[in-house]
């Protein structure tokens, strides 16, 4: 069993007067994580699944009297796949307010649906967390740092979805199933997607543009659509944990790119499955893009559930000066360049260093990437 970093974080937040909500894409291990917590807590617990019709009925026209015989003397109640419950928000509020000695843990695979349902009813009552696919740090803890570091090229190609990482030799089959059957499920279930073919085209276009700035107008022209539709679909892809956006930093320098954005996949394996390309690195022309997506997504995992999360950016000017990745933390800037091959020296742009208070500049390569991706 792979120890998830989020497990310890959740344990710290239990029985502190807040409902704990865990978001994450399908197949990232939310149910397994909660089951492990229950085992270790050794308290009387009940798991309810939002996919079950009788559980959805329980939340329909919810009252404390309706919940009381179900909750009984349980001390921990888990509502799994809560985004499937139409009246989840009000029901959770009633549970939270009426049974104060009971800890609620809620999981959902779509932040769009569940967050909207709980936004108003659960204001001030919830603590929210994101469960990613496995991370480099988690797998290094599972079977050793050296063993995991040796698998770097495999991770760049197949990623870290739990079923993929734990089933060597079956990665392609599992990823194809994930990409075709699971990832779109929440988006299509919302009922607002009228063009699933367009959604697939957007994903492929984004996969080909990893590491480059993305223009909604250019995507709309390329895919014969309109900017509003493209933006809506990308927003849905982000809220179902398939991609995430990295904004451009523009604050002080006159010729900085304005309103720029890059879009990365939360998992390299999904990116490659979208393109149907599982070729080894020696045969690829997109190794740099894979390396950048891996590093940014892994850093994203590392920082996501911290109490204080830095603001993150990339930086570029119209003169093509650029920095791959930047973190702003308490008015200081930490700048990083990503190089798959360490050839020659890399220098921080003088334009950038004059405009921003830089505390650190580092080049991240396969020789030192673990320092960038592990909790120290």
Image (spheres, rainbow, N blue to C red):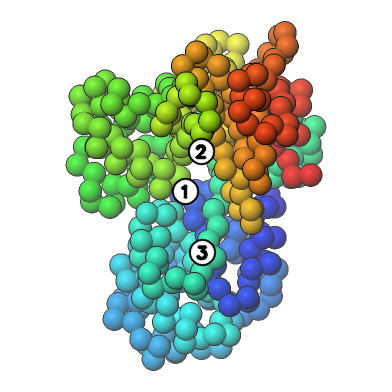
Crowdedness near tag 3: few (<14), some (14–19) or many (≥20) residues, C-alpha within 10 Å: many
Q: CA distance from mark 2 to mark 3?
A: 20 Å
Q: Answer left or right for 120 relative to 337.
A: left
**Is residue 169 something one can see in this rendering?**
no
| Residue 373 position in % (x across, y down) | 69, 37
- Taking the spot 44% from the left edge, 70% from the top edge, the residue there is 123
Mark identifier at residue 88: none
**Residue at x-position 73% and y-position 34%:** 359
Mark 3 lies on a secondary structure that is: strand
Camera-side residue: 74 or 235?
Answer: 235
Q: Quadrant of residue 171?
A: top right
Q: How many marks?
A: 3
Where is residue 71 shown, x and y percent of the image? 49, 84
Residue at (72% x, 8% y) in the render: 344
Circle 1 SS class: loop
Q: Is residue 208 above or below residue 74?
A: above
Q: CA distance from mark 1 to mark 3?
A: 13 Å
Residue assigned mark 3: 21
In front here: 178 or 78?
A: 78
Question: Would you place residue 173 above or below residue 78 in this image?
Answer: above
Residue linked to disc 2: 266
Q: Is residue 190 above or below residue 35?
A: above
| Residue 261 in view in this figure | yes
Q: Are marks 1 and 3 in contact (CB under 8 Å)?
A: no
């Amino acid at each position: 069993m792979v120890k998830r970093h989020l497990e310890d974080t959740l344990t710290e937040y239990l029985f502190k007067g807040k409902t704990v909500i865990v978001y994450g894409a399908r197949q990232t291990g939310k149910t397994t994580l909660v089951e492990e917590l229950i085992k270790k807590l050794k308290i009387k617990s009940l798991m309810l699944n939002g996919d079950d019709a009788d559980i959805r009925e329980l939340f329909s026209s919810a009252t404390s009297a309706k919940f009381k015989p179900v909750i009984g003397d349980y001390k921990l109640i888990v509502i799994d796949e809560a985004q499937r419950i139409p009246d989840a928000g009000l029901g959770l509020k009633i549970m939270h307010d009426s049974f104060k000695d009971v800890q609620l843990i809620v999981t959902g695979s779509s932040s769009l649906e569940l967050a909207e349902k709980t936004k108003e009813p659960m204001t001030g009552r919830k603590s929210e967390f994101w469960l990613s696919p496995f991370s480099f740090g988690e797998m290094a803890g599972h079977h050793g740092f050296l063993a995991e570091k040796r698998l770097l090229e495999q991770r760049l190609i197949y990623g870290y979805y739990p079923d993929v990482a734990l089933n060597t030799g079956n990665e392609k089959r599992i990823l194809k199933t994930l990409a075709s059957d699971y990832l779109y499920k929440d988006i299509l279930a919302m009922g607002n997607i009228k063009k699933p073919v367009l959604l697939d085209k957007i994903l492929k276009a984004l996969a080909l543009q990893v590491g480059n700035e993305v223009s909604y107008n250019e995507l709309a022209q390329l895919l014969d659509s309109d900017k509003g539709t493209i933006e809506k679909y990308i927003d849905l892809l982000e809220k179902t944990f398939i991609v995430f956006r990295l904004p451009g930093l523009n604050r002080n320098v006159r010729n900085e790119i304005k309103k720029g954005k890059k879009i990365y996949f939360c998992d390299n394996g999904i990116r490659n499955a979208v393109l149907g390309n599982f070729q080894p690195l020696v045969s690829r022309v997109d190794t740099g893009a894979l390396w950048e997506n891996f590093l940014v997504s892994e850093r994203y995992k590392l920082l996501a559930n911290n109490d204080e999360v830095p603001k993150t950016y990339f930086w570029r000017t119209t003169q093509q000066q650029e920095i791959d990745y930047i973190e702003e933390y308490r008015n200081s800037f930490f700048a990083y360049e990503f190089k798959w091959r360490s050839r020659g020296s890399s220098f921080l742009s003088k334009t950038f260093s004059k405009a921003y208070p830089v505390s650190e500049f580092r080049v991240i390569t396969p020789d030192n990437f673990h320092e960038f991706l592990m909790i120290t």
